[in-house]
């Protein structure tokens, strides 16, 4: 929080009035709250509006919560044992409200007084003409609270805390005690001009009102201020890292272009799209700058990233360096190898593949070729990271599907060249929303291919119900008769792999019955890779017309003649998965189709997913919807990132604030990179405080 924290905010929590050693220990253990500072930063996740009272006669359906002053007239215990419930009659003179308890009945009977006056709070629901609240929050009516209370903060709690009667009210009482003496010690963490420019409230006000707001507006302002601050420092750290790296790590300068020119003039099989040209320019600019490149290349499936990777590799090769490409799975590695080898062979370049299934002898040959420089390009899996893989001069690493690799692995690749860190190009076919890209990959520069090669017809996506099945099958048949091939995909059943396979086999049998005249391939997760490969090859070679599969075909399969993707139980798939699957078709010149099959009953979210798929082919648009539905924590790649432990900001909603915070950081670092000006001292102090907090390991033990 600030340097002064050392004397005040570092005070042990047990010394707070009303806490003491035993409750202090529970707070340590259950909530990781050790100090005054920790408590202050323990933000509530919502608030209850206790400022207003309602009358029973005014209750209506759809009320989130109601607060009523009145009298507990009587109660009755209904049922026995585990099924027992207690029903109380409560009235405020305008009507009667039933209060129901299923749990803690004994406690209620012992502690609540009949004919006593209470304030009742909870979500009302109606049964005919009767209103009821289950497990209401009850307070004895006092002279103090009868005029209305506060915005009551609600904190996350654990069962252990509840057992010790440490509830949200208790925590907010402690918070009030603490804030009353602490708030003036809280230092501003943002420069004054920034606070003014974005009309933020001060840190002191924000902290007070995030816990104990006087009204909705004060709460909103507090959240806005704290979100801004959080995102500001998130971006500050990332951008600062990027600048340090640029400053500290020189890169090989690649300015010769002999092979490249040869390739462009004689071998390039198609015109590049404008988007491909643009990203190639961005990449080349980096690779000639004398600084090490760290760039993320985002492009939808089929946007043509492979050729961009190859052209980038040529630039490295032109300058006496080698290139590698690392993929997350063996299938993908094979596919890249095959794709790149076509070009490499034309150019007389030596390319090899290294995966876990390469034998020892072959591996030694590869090691030697890499070391003496006779191998130009190597494609592979994690096997590339092993220590025995050493290069003569590794100049470029292309990493496919970044989100499956961690930063530590990127660092391992850096070490493969002792003189210069190799340039790094990360490619991903999973478009992610801008806000996520900024926070997840804020330390990378970003290039985007947002255009598909010409002549591609956009895939038509249709939503069909199980009751349309016959007509859907007729459609498949007519496509196959035109010489095309069809994918039929079944969902993974989360609970069990056996169920998944059974579901798939049932489907397979019904497809076989419906299409007796065609040959089928089948691929699922329980098959060995050789078997899978055999089936895939048959499909690829047009020996079979239909490929029935679980989602194992999600990434990497390339069969341009396949023009229909039929997805069974489409409601069971996430948006990004559906989009990835759809990307398997539309690779040839023919019109392609994606058919989403569901039954008639669809929830609200499912309907939005399906509608989004039908409406657009744009992966970035789809990822925005996905983010709004699932939140950042469940999006591909965010789990292991650790960068997303944001406390107040929500990337699905706060994109605008993130953008402003990021621009503010860039402007400040542009004008005052060392933070020397007086107005930027709050930043310097806060960064130091954050850093010393990070290294304060004692808290974790
Ligand atoms: P992805 O971005 O999914 O890796 P690929 O690189 O596999 O896409 O490209 C998909 C297909 O489009 C490949 O068959 C590739 O040869 C072709 N392709 C790539 N760029 C172009 C282009 N500019 N014009 C025509 N076809 C292209
Ligand atoms: Mg690809």
Image (cartoon, grey):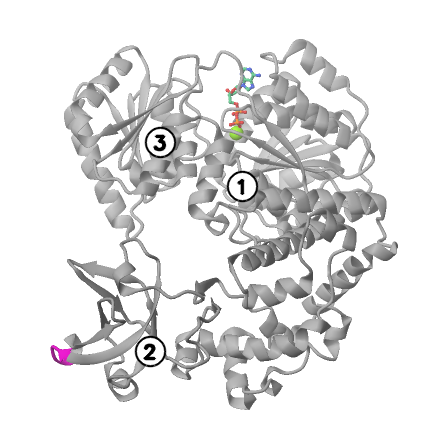
Split into 4 quadrants, where in the image is the C terminus? bottom right
Q: How far is disc 3 from disc 2 in space, using C-alphas?
A: 49 Å
Q: Which residue lies at the image location 49% right of the left edge and 52% below the top edge?
A: 633
The part of the chain drawn in magenta is: 77-81
Q: Which residue is mark 1?
A: 355
Left of 398 or right of it: where is 26? left
Nearest to N terminus: mark 1 or mark 3: 1
Q: Which residue is mark 3?
A: 611
Neighbourhood count class around disc 3 (C-alpha, 10 Å): few under 14, some 14–19, many 20 upward: some
Q: Is residue 688 above or below residue 170?
A: above
Quadrant of the rendered structure where residue 474 is? top left
For this rendering, which residue is in front, 576 or 69?
Answer: 69
Residue 104 in view? yes
In this rendering, which labeled residue sits more in front, label 1 or label 2?
Answer: 2
Q: How far is disc 1 from disc 2 in space, using C-alphas?
A: 71 Å
Left of 83 or right of it: where is 371? right
Q: Which residue lies at the image location 51% right of the left edge and 53% below the top edge?
A: 639
Describe the element under mark 3 as helix, strand or loop.
Answer: helix
Number of labels in the image equals 3
């Amino acid at each position: 929080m600030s340097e002064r924290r050392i004397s005040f905010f570092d005070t042990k929590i047990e010394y707070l009035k009303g806490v003491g050693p035993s409750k202090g220990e529970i707070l340590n253990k259950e909530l990781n709250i050790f100090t005054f500072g920790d408590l202050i930063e323990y933000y509530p996740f919502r608030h209850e509006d206790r400022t207003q009272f309602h009358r029973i006669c005014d209750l209506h359906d759809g009320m989130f919560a109601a607060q009523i002053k009145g009298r507990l007239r009587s109660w009755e215990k209904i049922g026995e044992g585990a099924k027992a419930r207690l029903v109380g009659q409560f009235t405020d003179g305008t009507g009667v409200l039933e209060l129901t308890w299923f749990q803690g009945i004994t406690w209620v009977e012992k502690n609540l007084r009949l004919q006593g006056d209470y304030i009742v709070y909870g979500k009302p629901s109606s049964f005919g003409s009767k209103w009821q609240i289950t497990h209401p929050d009850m307070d004895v009516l006092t002279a103090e609270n009868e005029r209305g209370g506060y915005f009551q903060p609600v904190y996350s709690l654990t069962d252990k805390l509840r057992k010790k009667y440490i509830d949200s009210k208790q925590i907010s009482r402690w918070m009030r005690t603490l804030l009353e003496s602490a708030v003036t010690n809280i230092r501003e963490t943002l420069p004054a001009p920034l606070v003014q420019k974005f009309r933020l409230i001060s840190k002191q006000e924000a902290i007070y009102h995030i816990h104990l707001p006087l009204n909705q507006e004060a709460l909103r302002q507090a959240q806005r201020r704290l979100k801004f601050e959080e995102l500001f420092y998130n971006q500050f750290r990332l951008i600062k890292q990027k600048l340090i790296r640029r400053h500290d790590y020189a890169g090989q300068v690649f300015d010769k272009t002999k092979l490249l020119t040869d390739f462009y003039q004689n071998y390039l099989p198609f015109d590049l799209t404008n988007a491909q040209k643009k990203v190639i320019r961005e990449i080349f600019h980096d690779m000639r700058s004398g600084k090490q490149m760290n760039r993320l290349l985002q492009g939808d499936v089929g946007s043509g990233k492979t050729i961009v990777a190859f052209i980038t590799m040529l630039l490295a090769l032109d300058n006496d360096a080698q290139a590698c490409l690392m993929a997350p799975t063996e299938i993908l590695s094979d596919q890249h190898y095959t794709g790149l080898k076509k070009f490499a062979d034309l150019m007389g370049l030596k390319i090899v593949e290294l995966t876990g299934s390469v034998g020892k002898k072959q591996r030694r040959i590869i090691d030697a070729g890499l070391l003496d420089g006779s191998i130009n390009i190597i494609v592979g899996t994690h096997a590339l990271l092993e220590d025995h893989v050493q290069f003569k001069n590794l100049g470029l690493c292309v990493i496919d599907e970044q989100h499956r690799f961690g930063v530590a692995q990127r660092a391992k690749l850096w070490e493969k060249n002792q003189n210069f860190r190799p340039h790094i190009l990360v490619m991903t076919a999973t478009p992610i929303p801008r806000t996520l890209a900024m926070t997840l990959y804020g330390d990378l520069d970003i290039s985007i291919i947002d255009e598909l090669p010409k002549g591609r017809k956009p895939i038509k996506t249709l939503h069909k119900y199980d009751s349309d099945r016959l007509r859907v099958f007729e459609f498949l048949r007519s496509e196959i008769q035109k010489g095309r091939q069809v994918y039929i995909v079944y969902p993974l059943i989360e609970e069990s792999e056996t169920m998944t396979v059974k579901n798939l086999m049932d489907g397979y049998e019904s497809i076989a019955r419906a299409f007796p005249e065609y040959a089928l391939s089948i691929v699922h997760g329980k098959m060995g890779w050789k078997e899978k490969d055999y089936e895939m090859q048959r499909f690829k070679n047009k020996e079979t017309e239909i490929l029935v599969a679980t989602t194992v075909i999600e990434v990497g399969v390339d069969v341009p003649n396949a023009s229909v993707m039929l997805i069974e139980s489409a409601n069971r798939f996430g948006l990004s998965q559906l989009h990835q699957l759809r990307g398997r078709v539309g690779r040839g010149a023919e019109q392609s189709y994606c058919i989403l099959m569901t039954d008639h009953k669809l929830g609200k979210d499912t309907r939005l997913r399906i509608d989004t798929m039908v409406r657009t082919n744009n992966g970035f648009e789809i990822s925005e919807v996905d983010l709004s539905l699932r939140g950042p924590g469940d999006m591909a790649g965010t789990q292991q990132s650790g960068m997303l432990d944001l406390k107040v900001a929500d990337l699905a909603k706060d994109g605008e604030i993130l953008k402003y915070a990021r621009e503010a950081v860039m402007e400040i670092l542009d004008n005052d990179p060392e933070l020397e000006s007086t107005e930027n001292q709050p930043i310097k102090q806060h960064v130091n405080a954050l850093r010393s907090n990070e290294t304060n390991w004692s808290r974790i033990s």
